[in-house]
Amino acid sequence: MTSTMPSTASSPAHAVAGRVSVTPGFGPLAFAARAWFVAAAVGQGIFALYVLVFYGGAVASGHPERWNDVLSRGHVPGDGVGNLVLGLHLLFAVQIIVGGIVQCLPAIRRRWPALHRWNGRVYMLSATTLALGGLYLVWIRSGSAGDAVQHAGVSLDALLILVFAALSWRAARARRFDAHRRWALRLFLVVSGVWFFRIGLMLWILANRGPVGFDPETFSGPALNVIAFAQSLLPLAVLELYFRATAGGAGLRRMATVILWLCVLATFAGIGAATMLLWWPRL
C-alpha cells in the first residue's frame, strides 16, 4: 500500500508525528505503492468533501434531520448526547482524512517539519477520539444499521485503531523508528476502515450488478458481514505482504507488485461506483 523512508527524526516528538509517506525509491513495487496512494488520496478526498457538504450543509441550513436520508439513526430529536457524538464523529472523519493525506506527502515533511509534527500529534488524538466515538455509536446508541456481526467488525477496526496508535506512540518514545513507521502505516489503514467499507460495498454491488448477499432494506447479510471485517483485515494483509516484499526476493516483489496493481484497479473502481451512486447525488 503506502510506505515510508527510514526515519531520521532526531527526537521522539518528531517521530510521533507519524512518518506515513510514499516510498521515494524507484522500481515497480515502489511505483505501484505510489499509484495506490494516489488512488486513496483521490477517493478519500471525495469522501471528505461529501461528508463536509452533505452533513455539514444540513446543519448549516438548520435541517440536521437530513442526516436520516442516509443514516438509519442520524439526527434523533431529544438525543442531544447521541447527536453531538455523531456530529463530532463526522467532523473528526473529515479532519482525519485530510490530516492523513497531508502526513503522506514527503514535501510537507521536508518544507514544513513543524506542521508535519503537529499534524501527526493531532492525527493520533483524532484517531483515538474517532475510535471511541465509533464504539459509542455502535454499542451504546441504539438503532445503528447492521447486525451484531457487522458491529463486531466495526468494533475490531476501532480497537485496532486504539492499539496501533498506542504502539506507534510507544515505539517512537523508545526511538525505535522503524517499528514506529510500520505501526503508523497500520494505523493509517485502519483509520480508513469506514472509507474501505464504502468502496468495498460499491465494488461488490458493481461486480454483481446489484445488492447480492445482503438485504438493502435491513442492511444485513453475509456479504456485509464479510466486508465489515475485510475493511481492516484485507488492507493490513496487503501491507504486511508489502513489508515482506521490500526485504524479500525478486519473486515475492513481483507478486506484491501485481497484487498492488490489482488493488489500484479495485480501488479506482470502488471509488467510481461510490462517487456516482452514494456521494455525487448528494453534493
Image: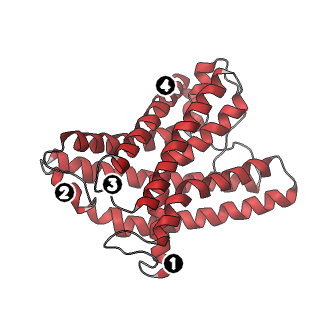
Q: Nearer the viewer, mark 3 or mark 1?
A: 1
Provide residue 49's location: percent of width, then percent of height: 35, 51
Nearer to the camera, 50 or 220:
220
Provide residue 134's location: percent of width, then percent of height: 39, 45
Residue behind mark 1 = 207
Is the residue marked by circle 4 packed among few (<14), some (14-19), or many (20+) residues within 10 Å? some
Q: Identify the mark nearer the N-term, 4 or 1.
A: 4
Q: Which mark, residue 66? A: 2
Q: CA distance from mark 2 to mark 4?
A: 35 Å
| 96 up-or-down from 73: above or below | above
Q: Nearer the viewer, mark 2 or mark 4?
A: 2
Provide residue 69's location: percent of width, then percent of height: 22, 62
What residue type is disc 3 on?
Answer: Tyr
Return the residue found at the far top: 11
Q: Secondary structure at mark 1?
A: helix
What residue type is disc 4 on?
Answer: Trp
Q: Looking at the rendering, which quadrant does residue 21 occupy?
A: top right
Q: CA distance from mark 4 to mark 1?
A: 41 Å
What residue type is disc 2 on?
Answer: Arg
